[in-house]
Image (tube, rainbow, N blue to C red):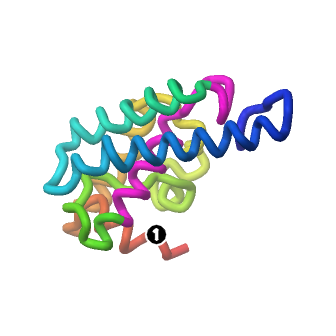
Amino acid sequence: MYGEKSEPAQSSVDATKFREEVINFLRSNIIPKYKNGCTEDLHYKNIELLIAHANKVDPGILCKEGYKYGVAQKLLNLTLKYYWCLELISEPPHCPIDRIIINKTRYKGKINWTQISRRSEYEEVINEIQALARKEGLSIPQWELTHYGRR
């Protein structure tokens, strides 16, 4: 998953440093913004902040194109899901987008979450999930909790 480095030992050190710095940034700079709720616009900005920070720490550790939007949204949304389920924050605006969730939409087989590189691609999936959730009278996170385990 990590980008190629010249020396395996250095690659391991780089990966550990990268994980620690990204997680610390997430905990201290982004998660607190969700304590009492977060707007969708701020959520998109937070994904972009996470991407910018990860690229500053090591722009090529995951791939030569840098930290992708799909990877950043998954990390942030999954973290928020756990914090929300533990009642540490208010309900987040979105849910983690991954293969299982994409397969519940019309984008099954058309979009790979790890290859999402732009906000517009992510928004397409979110808009589809929002429409599906509305049909059931649910929010996006509630819909995901209901449908994630159903394969």
In this orientation, which residue lies closer to the viewer: 130 or 33? 33
Q: Which residue is mark 1?
A: 148
Q: Residues within 10 Å of mark 1 (few under 14, many from 20)?
A: some
**Rendered location of residue 124, percent (x, y):** 39, 39
Q: Residue at x 32, y 71 (%)?
A: 85
Task: Relative to 18, say whether 99 is above or below.
Answer: below
Q: Residue at x 29, y 33 (%)?
A: 45
Horizontal side, residue 7 vs residue 45: left or right: right
**Rendered location of residue 53, percent (x, y):** 45, 30
Within the image, what quadrant is residue 12 found in?
top right
Q: Which image quarter is the C terminus in?
A: bottom right
Total numbered badges shown on the rendered structure: 1
In this orientation, which residue lies closer to the viewer: 59 or 95? 59
Amino acid type assigned to the residue bearing label 1 in the image = Tyr
Residue 78 belongs to the span the image colors magenta = yes
Q: Residue at x 50, y 32 (%)?
A: 54
Q: What span is colored magenta in the figure?
A: 60-82
Task: Relative to 89, say whether 33 is above or below.
Answer: above
Within the image, what quadrant is residue 10 found in?
top right
Within the image, what quadrant is residue 68 found in?
top right
Residue at the outermost right position: 7
Q: Secondary structure at mark 1?
A: loop
